[in-house]
Amino acid sequence: MLSSSTSAPAATAPASRFGLRLIPLLIGLLSMGFGLYGGLIRLGVEPPADMRSMAEFHGAFMISGFLGTVICLERAVALGRPWPYAGPLLSSAGAIALVAGAPRLGALAFAAAGAVLLLASADIAIRQVALFTIVLTVGVACWIVGTLQWLLGDFTPAVTGWWLDFLILTVAAERLELGRVRELSRPSQTTFAGAILLLLFGGARGEFAESWALLTAAGLIGCSAWLLSHDIARRTIRLRGQPRFSATAILTAHAWLGVAGVVLATAPLGAAGFAYDASVHAITIGFALSMIFGHAPIILPAVTGIRVRYSRMAYAPLFLLQLSLVLRIAGDILEQGSLRTASGFVTVIALAAYAVTLVLASTKRVSPE
């Protein structure tokens, strides 16, 4: 999910730290698996009796156990020092605690991981004071606030708003960092900051637990419009091979952010049951996972040291991912449980197909064009 420029130190990272990177990465991927299974249970798949708790922790697995671990790990690699690796190790421990049925311990571990990530992000912000480093740091604070609310037993939708702000601010800040190549004007940066503030105000008001989420909606639409207008992906999509694929995934992700905003602006969360589900998954699947598709060939080599090759077949799972979200939102609007259940399986297939595509392209050297 993170920009290639912040991952440069990975190439020279000591071999002794390989375990500090590989173990959290593997646990993060397992957390994603548990999160996806929990999502399928919520969509109606009947689980074994000892796996029913996976549905309750679906969001925590996906946002804190998986995405939180990946973001902590990338930040640690970027800094190139030992202490930030405590972040991904702690978030991994949190995921393990959830599997063991100890959510309070898991929440404490996630909060501790957030604290380490906050220190790492603040370290970057102090050394390089800029809008993007400040937004990165504030994004981590959102993760901590949401996790502490969850630990205290707060209503889950209110927690969701903070966790989503964590994801959005992290990605948006990194795209802003890349946008510095274009020497963004002060009004443009002010517009960006305004959209971010709307998201933060929405999170502070706990809008996902209210009837309407108008501030959040405005922030999402503003971020989407800004990113679609200013992201460097608008240039790289004109290239061929990997740059075009990544740009396609990134611009698609930005568009889904706008869709989430439109849903929240036009449908009350309390009266229309589809609005919450549709907007949350437009962000987590459409925005976050599409962004991962675009950045995986860059981040995986930085974290693991293993070269990942591109194949044009990667467009197929990217398309499936978008199709899964279309099915999900259609099922929400039409109140068709079968469509929503089908969407969950298509999402899992898309992720598995993308992983297989990357492996085959890297091992068999599939033609990149």
Image (tube, helix red, strand yellow):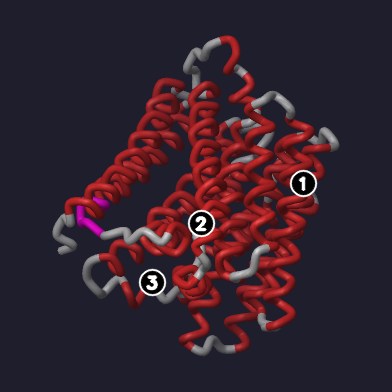
Quadrant (top left/top right/bottom left/bottom right) for the C terminus: bottom left
Residue range of the region highlighted in magenta in the rendering: 310-314
Residue 200 visible to the viewer: yes
Where disc 1 sits, the SS reads loop
Asked whether the residues under the numbered discs 2 and 3 touch, taking CB atoms below 8 Å apart as contact, a structural biologist would say no
Secondary structure at numbered mark 3: helix
Q: Residue at x 46, y 49 (%)?
A: 289
The amino acid beneath tag 2 is Phe
Q: Nearer the viewer, residue 298 or 135?
A: 298
> Is 278 drawn above or below residue 112 in the view shown?
above
Mark 3 belongs to which amino acid?
Ala
- Distance, label 2 to label 3, CA atoms, is 31 Å
Comes first in the chain, label 2 or label 1: 2
- The amino acid type found where label 1 is placed reads Gly
**Percent of width and height locating residue 170:** 60, 62
Residue 202 in view here: no
Alpha-carbon span between mark 2 and mark 1: 40 Å
- Residue 206 marker: 1
Q: Mark 3 highlights which residue? A: 233
**What residue is at 56 percent from the left and 65 percent from the top?**
77
Residue 172 in percent (x, y) is at 56, 66
Q: Nearer the viewer, mark 2 or mark 3?
A: 2
Residue marked by disc 2: 18
Helix, strand or loop at mark 2: helix
